[in-house]
Image (spheres, grey):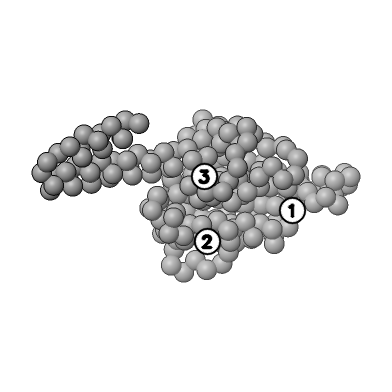
Amino acid sequence: MLNKDILKKIDNITDSSVRKDWKLNLLTKIHKVKNRKIRSDFLTFVKYIWPDFIEGNHHQTISDKFNRLQSGDLKRLIINMPPRHTKSEFASYFLPAWMIGNNPKLKIIQATHTAELAIRFGRKAKNLIDSSEYREIFDTRLQEDSKAAGRWETNKGGEYFAVGVQGAVTGRGADLLIIDDPHSEQDANSTTAFDNAYEWYTSGPRQRLQPGGRIVLV
């Protein structure tokens, strides 16, 4: 409403060149404020990238947690919801792209119960970072020789590594560790599968966590 009032006052300026300059300055400021909001608020970022997104109360709750994760106020997060609640889309697609946009030096390990699924998430995040919409907001760019969907780097030293549960993470570090569905539906009643996943987690990814590193479990 404030911007509309300002525009009305600008329209009353008789000198056309002055009027044009004022409008340009106002639109530039509006654009900068919008971009700053997209960078600082996860849900605003999602709505910018996904215009058809339909928001629910649980999305705001997740977004608030992700904002705290980004700021460093939150280091451990478990998201436990029924299927079709957008939790994987948020945690394994939008979150890594948003966080590495804010910090192009970020090192991310993405794990799921199969390497194929983890790589699929990596491909989606990589394609998003390469998109024109993303480039309008963030300065983060992919390394020119980063072609693999599940293993790519930014031009500032950031890294993304996709791995399946039981896969090797030797030599990798993680500022952000995302574990999305570490068990398949077939493993739901298998104590052995649960024990194996936990042993892999404690002896592998958790040992790769950088100082101040954050963990998201879906």
Q: Secondary structure at mark 2?
A: helix
Q: Secondary structure at mark 3?
A: helix
Tell me which amino acid carries mark 3: Lys
Relative to 59, is 193 above or below?
Answer: below
Residue that label 3 marks: 47
The mark lying in front, picked from 1 and 2, is: 2
- Residues under numbered marks 3 and 1 in contact, where contact means CB atoms less than 8 Å apart: no
Could you tell me which residue is drawn at 53 percent across and 45 percent down?
46
Relative to 144, is 202 above or below?
Answer: above
The percent coordinates of residue 110 (x first, y second) are 62, 52
Residue 55 falls in image quadrant: top right
The percent coordinates of residue 1 (x first, y second) are 35, 31
The percent coordinates of residue 128 (x first, y second) are 51, 57
Residue that label 2 marks: 127
Residue that label 1 marks: 113
Q: CA distance from mark 3 to mark 1?
A: 29 Å
Q: CA distance from mark 1 to mark 2?
A: 22 Å
Tell me which amino acid carries mark 2: Asn
- Mark 3 and mark 2 lie on one chain; the one further toward the N terminus is 3
Q: Is residue 206 left or right of residue 34?
A: right
Q: Nearer the viewer, residue 121 or 150?
A: 121
The mark lying in front, picked from 3 and 1, is: 3
Could you tell me which residue is drawn at 18 percent across and 47 percent down?
20
Could you tell me which residue is drawn at 57 percent across and 54 percent down?
172
Could you tell me which residue is drawn at 46 percent across and 60 percent down?
131
Q: Nearer the viewer, residue 209 or 128?
A: 128
Visible in this render: residue 151?
yes
- Quarter holding the C terminus is top right
- Mark 1 and mark 2 lie on one chain; the one further toward the N terminus is 1
Q: CA distance from mark 3 to mark 2?
A: 17 Å
Residue 57 falls in image quadrant: top right
